[in-house]
Image (tube, grey):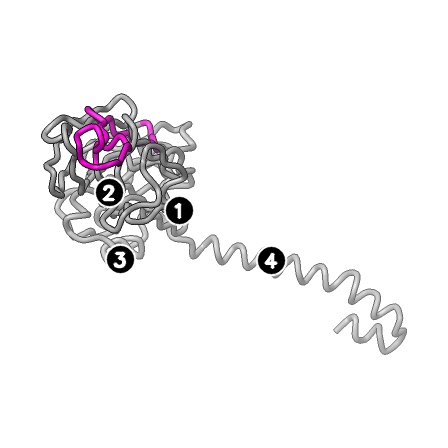
Amino acid sequence: MFATSLWIWRARLGLGLFIWLFIPWIVIISNIEVYRKLHETRMKPNDTMVGMLINGRLTAADLSKLVMVQDAREGNYFPQMMEGLFFNTPSIAYLQIKPDQLTFDLASTPKDMDWVLLMGNHTLTGEALNQTHMDYLSFGNTTLFGGHGSFAVDFTKNQWPGLINEQVGLFNPPETWGAWSISDKVVLKFTKPLPRKFDLIITARSFGPNLNQDFLIELGKNSLPVRFDSLFETKQLRFDNPHKLSQIEIIIPKPTSPSSLGQGDDKRSLGIGLKEFIIQW
């Protein structure tokens, strides 16, 4: 009203006052109010809306493997959270981190816990930053992370975009059923670190002298033996991967060419025929 009255008396002065004084003042005050409202309505750790969201997202089995992580600086309000969040489970694990710990690595999660509910303004590090196959849900100052899933590598294809960057020791192009190893070792370099714990489900067969011999499946220092018949079989191996490695190697016991066995002119050193890999966590 003041600017309008001034504009009637002296238009140029009234317009300048409105543009250079009142508009910036309105913008600043509006932004302050918007920020204040957002801060007031932001979900807090004991907000029942968090409980509603998580109850809708997780099954009872998932909730039994959920651990809450809380910064000690925010006080011990765990009993209030249990009442406020009204989770549909009798007990939930609880972990308190140090007051000066601004980040949380999933490797700190207690054994056999698949889900983490991180309370407070903290940054997830380690596995959480590069495991895009994991579920990640952030609301307010609360983060839910974890879950299960799987992906498959089909060896009837010669490329696996988004899954494997590089392979060594497999014959390309593959055959209609899959691919033979043609060296004493097969190396598969995945594009992302593999899960911290996972099952490797292999469908494969062996060639010639490799029948019922131990193929070593190696992930870093972990080495597990597995045997295959001359027909396709499916075997399952369990791996722990605390260092988030991304390379799997298969050591072939006796690479042998068909020609050396009098089975034609094929001089490739065959060992294992791979049809499918499934990584399941």
Position of 18 relative to 72 (above/below)? below
Is residue 268 highlighted in magenta?
yes
Does the CB distance between marks 4 and 3 fall below 8 Å? no
The answer to which of marks 2 and 1 sits earlier in the sequence is 1
Secondary structure found at label 4: helix
Instruction: Identify the amino acid type marked 3.
Output: Met
**Residue 37 in view, yes or no:** yes
Which of the labelled discs sits on residue 31, or is there none? 4
Which of the labelled discs sits on residue 52, or is there none? 3
Position of 22 relative to 122 (above/below)? below
Does the CB distance between marks 2 and 1 fall below 8 Å? no
Q: Position of residue 84 (x, y in %)?
A: 25, 51
| Disc nearest the viewer among 4 and 1 | 1
Of residues 61 and 28, the one nearer the viewer is: 61
The answer to which of marks 4 and 3 sits earlier in the sequence is 4
Crowding at mark 2 (Cα within 10 Å: few <14, some 14-19, many 20+): some
